[in-house]
Image (spheres, rainbow, N blue to C red):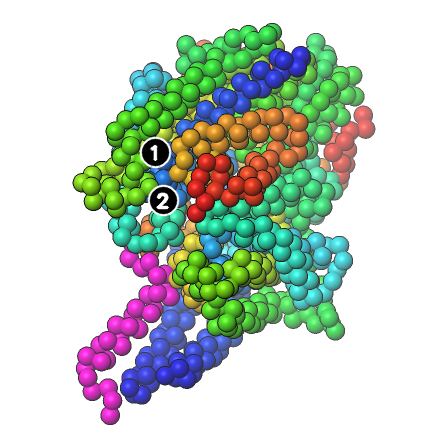
């Protein structure tokens, strides 16, 4: 049974990857911008799922990871002209280092307090952008971010399609890594913390350290998303640090289906597409937006991925009703 | 058991493919949703703020554009073709602004932009114009650096900039009785630009700047700042606050009776705020980018057309500035006999237009529009339901436009 | 300006601001205390109060009328939302669901207000009786702010008295601590919940009406206030009414004096305060550690 579901997983992944590879040839070029941004958001949302879905740590300040990554990569490119793929890795690394003390402070607390501490740090980051405007460009942000070639003369990411493939590879790679993490003993401990923190602590786990580490990891993938964004959009600006985004990414996770990794990726993609296209169709798009969310809560609380799971379950039940499934 | 799994996975696979196909087609869907337009129409892209903090300014942009569309198309359009405005919501965010412009260029083949509300949005769009082969004319972006340090070829600014507004004000105040000035500004690009410009202008006019303070965007309580202003014992206070911040400041200042102790001056005089503040706004002295009370032929025509279309609404500074920008844009296009960016650039350089603000010259060296400067005082006038900006003095354009590619004045 | 005058004036500035903050924050903390809901729509309700107050004040010419009636109307809107949508979530043990549904409500309310009243800001003039200043040690101070301070103190005292000294207040406090037990003892818990929710919405609306002569009613009001409200509630301790009072005063003082001495950090000050408090007392000043 285990092997069958593993096989199914890899089959589905394979098909998804093939489909994703074909996308640039099927979709008009102007739409590719949105597609790439949607994938980046998907990565961002998945990073939060590690906290929300697997450890039940609600963060209200996850935008800080994104903003840190974006500004780091923007600054590295503007000041040092380091090749793009290296910049993305460096920026992620820097942001992760910054996250270590922040995560340490935040994980001293629980529940809503934890959430508000993360918010506090995100807001402080936002304020710093305006205070140190000589470095960060203040309200103007940092425009004019290019995508330096290299290493070894690589330049496929100069083109939108090339960048898309890079982001796709990073997303899939990150997803697989996260999957390994959540299925590992570390991940099992996180589930334990999610279900019953007190009991897990009693069993001898140092809950605090687990939380600390998972927050850092979440920041790592979140800042990776931000680091991918700045060279793509060509700039970093304070709106990438705005608190409202922390709320929307939380919603992406929940709409997608928390605790599934895939769900939030889909949630992130869905959200961005929805926002973009709704605002094209109607000026009243916020009303539809809000209503869609409310409908999801009421009728599809497990999110998009949950819908899929329940549909599959219904199919399963129907098949077993028919009885003659086995030969 | 085994068969069940196979059927399930087959179902999943099919579902996956069907799902992806559906997703992909939704990406292309909106292209079909855009109504089919006459192939010959000239498209003007308006990436403006429809939802969000500055939605008021965006609503002005849209209503003036719609009026212009109606008026122009009734008289043959531009270059013999009808014009069509394509409105996009940027929500005041630079990243969204760039994305929407990119879509306008790539999907709608629309390469002319105006109506951008926030200076940082303009700042983000400008570096991309060359690559998009697009043209952008500002109607209301005040940051002085847009035509100085951040100059790009395909960008023109038709409107009065923040340094120009501050300059006109300083010239007027030179002979005034106030000697010491304090300044309060919004802690963002325009606020700093505005205060800096005013400070240098007022000090070269022989006055003293005793202090300045910047409030974060979104500040709601100005009690501390008002206390600071009163403490400084300055006779005049320069206010570089707009929109929500401006209204909050003026309302609270009125409660403190600040206007009785200090003469407040500003370079943004917004009718929307005057209406909201009512009596609280009377006595404000300012440099207005566009006062609807200016009497020349072009403006009289515009104001009556505006009030006929919008039921006695008063055109705000952003309405007049947008109207002028479009006026200049269309004249340049007709002079160039083209809608291509580089040709418009060439035609607009050195172009002088008799607009609703008087004779405005689009300067070649930095693409800044040389505008007249209007000093107004908000006054209650019998016959008007709300206070209006009464023009006290007009400065000629050469007096208030800064040096080329600069925000400073050598004279 | 002499130090004494300065201190007095700034303290009055802070207290008047604290009063406004109190109306918003207390509503939020009461709702959380009784229903464990993080009401993302609280800012939108505040804004709705401001706009409804504007319409009432403009049409009847009476600010007092607006101040009394607008909160009632907003409370009704809140109740409608609660009974139609929120109620369906009670069975679920899902904090995320409340967050999302109140977020959806906030988004819809924001847009609905824009549709009904338009994008232009709406001004409400300071009521005639409260216009002008009183001179304190040679310095002008607005009568309106004095009014805010007095109103805030009396409202805080009244609600505190209601919660601590009346039987209904006792029931409310009991429900927020252990609703099952209270229900088993025969009290209609649903009614209590609804009552507190309505009071919470009403308080926010009062804040909205009071704020309009100082900031006018405008579309960005909701988001500008919701974050402040959350910070205050956290600082004071979620669910603690007294905490919301202390939090409001603390935040107001820190903001007023902080913006004076270090205007560069004006944006960050409130968060630094919250950070400091949470590190020392994770549940907030008067909250219980969760």
Measured as percent of width and height from the top left, residue A61 is found at 53, 49
Residue A34 seen in this snapshot:
no
Quarter-of-image position of residue B377: top right
Q: Which residue is mark 2?
A: C37
- On the picture, is B335 further left or further right than C39? right
Identify the chain of the residue marked 2, using the numbered disc in the image. Answer: C
Q: CA distance from mark 1 to mark 2?
A: 12 Å
- Checking the image for residue C200, the label placed there is 1
Q: Secondary structure at mark 2?
A: loop
**Dot 1: within a 10 Å radius of its alpha carbon, few (fewer than 14), some, or many (20 or more) residues?**
many
Task: Give the position of the N terminus of chain B as an image quadrant.
Answer: bottom left
B1 inside magenta stretch:
no
Task: Give the position of the C terminus of chain B as an image quadrant.
Answer: top right
- The earlier-in-sequence mark between 1 and 2 is 2
Q: Secondary structure at mark 1?
A: helix
**Residue found at x 41% / y 84%:** A3
Q: Nearer the viewer, residue C207 or A101?
A: A101
Identify the chain of the residue marked 1, using the numbered disc in the image. Answer: C
| Residue range corresponding to the magenta coloring | A298-327
**Dot 2: within a 10 Å radius of its alpha carbon, few (fewer than 14), some, or many (20 or more) residues?**
many
Furthest-bottom residue in this view: A327
Callouts 1 and 2 close, C-beta under 8 Å = no
Measured as percent of width and height from the top left, residue A219 is found at 57, 58
């Amino acid at each position: 049974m285990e092997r069958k579901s593993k096989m199914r997983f890899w089959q589905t992944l394979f098909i998804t990857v093939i489909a994703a590879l074909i996308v640039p040839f099927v979709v008009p070029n102007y739409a590719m911008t949105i597609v790439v941004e949607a994938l980046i958001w998907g990565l961002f949302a998945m990073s939060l799922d590690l906290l929300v879905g697997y450890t039940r740590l609600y963060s209200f300040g996850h935008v800080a990871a994104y903003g840190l990554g974006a500004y780091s990569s923007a600054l590295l490119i503007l000041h040092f002209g380091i090749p793009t793929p290296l910049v993305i890795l460096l920026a992620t690394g820097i942001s992760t280092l910054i996250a270590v003390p922040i995560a340490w402070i935040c994980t001293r607390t629980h529940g809503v307090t934890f959430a508000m501490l993360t918010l506090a740090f995100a807001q402080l980051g936002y304020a710093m952008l305006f205070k140190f405007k000589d470095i960060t460009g203040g309200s103007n942000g940092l425009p004019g971010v290019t995508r330096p070639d290299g290493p070894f003369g690589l330049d496929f990411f100069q083109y939108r399609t090339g960048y898309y493939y890079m982001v796709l590879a990073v997303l899939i790679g990150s997803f697989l890594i996260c999957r390994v993490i959540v299925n590992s003993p570390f991940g099992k401990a996180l589930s334990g913390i999610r279900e019953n923190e007190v009991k897990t602590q009693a069993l001898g786990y140092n809950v605090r350290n687990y939380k600390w580490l998972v927050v850092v990891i979440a920041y790592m993938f979140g800042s990776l998303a931000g680091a991918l964004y700045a060279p793509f959009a060509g700039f970093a600006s304070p709106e990438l640090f705005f608190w409202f985004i922390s709320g929307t990414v939380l919603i992406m996770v929940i709409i997608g289906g928390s605790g599934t990794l895939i769900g939030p990726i889909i949630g992130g993609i869905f959200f961005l597409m929805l926002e973009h296209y709704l605002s094209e169709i109607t000026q009243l798009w916020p009303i539809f937006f809000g209503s869609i969310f409310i409908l999801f809560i009421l009728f599809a609380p497990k999110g998009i991925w949950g819908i899929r799971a329940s549909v599959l379950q219904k199919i399963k039940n129907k098949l077993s009703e028919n009885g003659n499934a086995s030969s | 058991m085994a068969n069940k799994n196979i059927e399930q996975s087959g179902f999943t696979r099919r579902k996956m493919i069907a799902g992806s196909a559906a997703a992909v087609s939704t990406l292309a869907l909106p292209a079909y949703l855009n109504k089919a337009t006459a192939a010959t129409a000239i498209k003007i892209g308006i990436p403006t703020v429809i939802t969000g903090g500055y939605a008021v300014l965006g609503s002005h942009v849209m209503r003036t554009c719609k009026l212009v569309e109606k008026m122009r198309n009734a008289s043959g359009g531009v270059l013999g073709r009808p014009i069509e405005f394509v409105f996009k919501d940027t929500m005041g965010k630079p990243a969204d602004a760039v994305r929407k412009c990119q879509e306008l260029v790539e999907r709608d083949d629309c390469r002319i932009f105006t109506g951008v509300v926030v200076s940082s949005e303009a700042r983000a769009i400008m570096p991309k114009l060359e690559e998009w082969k697009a043209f952008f004319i500002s109607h209301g972006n005040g940051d002085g650096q847009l035509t100085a340090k951040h100059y790009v070829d395909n960008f023109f600014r038709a409107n009065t900039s923040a340094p120009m507004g501050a300059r006109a004000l300083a010239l007027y105040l030179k002979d005034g009785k106030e000697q010491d000035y304090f300044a309060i500004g919004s802690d963002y690009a325009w606020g700093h630009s505005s205060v800096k410009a005013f400070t240098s202008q007022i000090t070269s006019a022989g006055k003293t700047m005793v202090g300045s303070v910047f409030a974060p965007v979104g500040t709601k309580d100005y009690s501390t700042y008002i206390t600071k202003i009163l403490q400084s014992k300055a006779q005049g206070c320069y206010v570089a606050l707009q929109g929500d911040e401006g209204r909050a400041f003026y309302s609270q200042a009125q409660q403190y009776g600040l206007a009785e102790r200090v003469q407040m001056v500003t370079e943004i005089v917004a009718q929307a705020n005057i209406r909201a503040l009512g009596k609280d706004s009377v006595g404000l002295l300012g440099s207005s980018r566009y006062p609807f009370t200016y009497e020349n032929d072009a403006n009289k025509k515009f104001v009556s057309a505006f009030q006929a279309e919008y039921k006695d609404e008063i055109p705000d500074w952003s309405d007049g500035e947008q109207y002028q920008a479009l006026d200049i844009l269309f004249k340049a296009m007709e002079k160039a006999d083209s809608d291509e960016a580089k040709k418009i650039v060439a035609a607009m350089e050195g172009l002088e237009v008799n607009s609703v603000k008087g004779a405005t010259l689009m300067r070649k060296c930095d693409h800044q529009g040389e505008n007249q400067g209007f000093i107004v005082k908000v006054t209650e006038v019998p016959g008007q339901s709300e206070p209006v900006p009464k023009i006290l003095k007009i400065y000629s354009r050469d007096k208030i436009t800064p040096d080329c590619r600069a925000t400073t004045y050598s004279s | 300006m002499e130090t004494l005058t300065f201190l007095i004036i700034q303290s009055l500035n802070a207290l008047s601001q604290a009063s406004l903050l109190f109306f918003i924050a207390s509503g939020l903390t009461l709702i959380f205390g009784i229903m464990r809901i993080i009401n993302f729509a609280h800012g939108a309700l505040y804004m709705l109060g401001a706009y409804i107050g504007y319409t009432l004040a403009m049409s009847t010419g009476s600010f007092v009328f607006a101040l009394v009636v607008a909160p009632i109307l907003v409370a009704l809107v809140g109740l409608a939302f609660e009974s139609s949508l929120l109620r369906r979530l009670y069975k679920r043990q899902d904090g995320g669901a409340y967050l999302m549904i109140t977020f959806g409500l906030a988004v819809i309310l924001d847009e609905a207000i824009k549709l009904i009243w338009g994008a232009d800001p709406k001004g409400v003039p300071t009521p005639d009786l409260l216009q002008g200043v009183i001179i304190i040690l040679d310095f002008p101070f607005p009568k309106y702010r004095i009014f805010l301070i007095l109103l805030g103190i009396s409202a805080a005292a009244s609600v505190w008295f209601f919660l601590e000294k009346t039987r209904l207040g006792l029931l409310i406090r009991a429900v927020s601590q252990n609703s099952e037990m209270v229900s088993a003892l025969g009290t209609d818990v649903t009614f209590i919940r609804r009552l507190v929710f309505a009071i919470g919405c009403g308080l926010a609306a009062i804040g909205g009406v009071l704020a309009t002569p100082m900031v006018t009613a405008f579309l960005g009001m909701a988001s500008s206030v919701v974050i402040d409200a959350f910070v205050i509630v956290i600082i004071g301790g979620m669910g603690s009414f007294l905490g919301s009072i202390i939090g409001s005063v603390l935040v107001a003082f820190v903001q007023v004096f902080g913006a004076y001495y270090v205007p560069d950090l004006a944006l960050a000050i409130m968060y630094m305060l919250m950070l400091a408090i949470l590190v020392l007392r994770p549940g907030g000043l008067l909250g219980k550690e969760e």
